[in-house]
Image: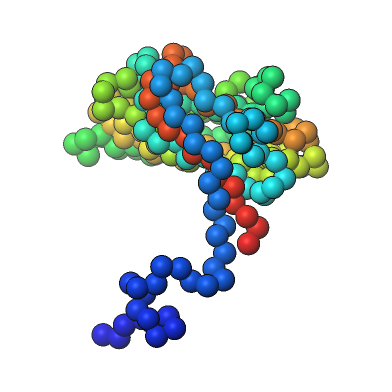
């Protein structure tokens, strides 16, 4: 079997490839500790959420609710966090299985989509507050600083629903129906605090 090499060195010995673009840039990490919300506001606490990047990625990791069976949600602001009420049209579907593998399914979650509403968008199924229950996933926001186009988003999460011992893979997509720049994003559970969890914000370059 041949060994793949780069400039006469094996791949295992290469620490960096000269000229390789670093497209993903870490901007900010927020850690919850019985927090009602976690918010990323452009220009506040070193947060960048403007025309610097065409795509922004949020990674939410082990977000655990203080209150049992709550959806994890987000909303957008067009006034630097004074109001989180951008009008949205969205769609949601899920795939699920229980711990025995005997109860599986794929379904359109019609009760979790929004049709020109301003409320928070669910980006996870309800999450239990058992010690080992949490939700993790990611949210992409595309060109939030545009003053021409609506603001598209895609979200995907994996959640342990402890009340029925099931895992849900949650898919949500939609757009904020505004041509104003979106300059803040807020995360929270539907009710109660974010007992624990981490959210990381990244910017993705054009190339």
Of residue 43 and residue 194, the one placed in the foreground of this image is: 43
Q: Is residue 90 left or right of residue 156?
A: right
- Residue placed at 33% from the left, 22% from the top? 128
- Residue appearing at x 64%, y 45% in the figure: 142
Q: Is residue 152 above or below residue 161?
A: below
**Residue 134 picture quarter:** top left
Which residue lies at the image location 66% right of the left edge and 33% below the top edge? 42
Is 64 above or below relative to 181?
Answer: above
* Scheme of colours in the image: rainbow
Q: Is residue 31 above or below residue 55?
A: above
Residue 207 visible, this angle: yes
The residue sitting at 19% across, 36% down in the picture is 100
Residue 25 location in percent, x, y?
Answer: 55, 50
Viewport quadrant of the C terminus: bottom right
Q: Is residue 171 visible?
A: no
Q: Residue furthest left?
A: 100
Q: Is residue 111 left or right of residue 129?
A: right
Name of the residue lying farthest toward the right: 148
Return the x and y of residue 204 as percentages of the image width and height: 59, 51
Residue 83 found in image quarter: top right
């Amino acid at each position: 079997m041949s060994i793949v090499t780069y400039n006469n060195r094996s791949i295992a010995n290469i620490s960096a490839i000269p000229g390789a673009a670093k497209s993903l840039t870490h901007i900010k990490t927020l850690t919850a500790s019985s927090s009602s919300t976690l918010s990323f506001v452009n220009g506040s606490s070193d947060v960048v959420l403007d025309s610097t990047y065409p795509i922004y990625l949020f990674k939410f990791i082990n977000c655990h609710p203080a209150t049992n069976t709550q959806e994890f949600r987000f909303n957008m602001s067009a006034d630097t966090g004074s109001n989180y009420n951008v009008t949205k049209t969205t769609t949601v579907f899920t795939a699920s299985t229980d711990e025995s593998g005997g109860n599986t399914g794929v379904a359109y979650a019609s009760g979790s989509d929004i049709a020109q509403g301003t409320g928070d968008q669910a980006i996870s199924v309800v999450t239990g507050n058992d010690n080992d229950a949490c939700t993790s996933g990611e949210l992409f926001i595309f060109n939030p600083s545009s003053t021409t186009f609506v603001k598209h988003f895609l979200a995907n999460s994996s959640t342990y629903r402890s009340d029925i011992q099931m895992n849900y893979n949650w898919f949500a997509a939609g757009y904020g129906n505004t041509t104003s720049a979106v300059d803040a994003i807020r995360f929270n559970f539907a009710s109660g605090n974010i007992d624990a969890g981490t959210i990381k914000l990244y910017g993705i370059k054009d190339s």
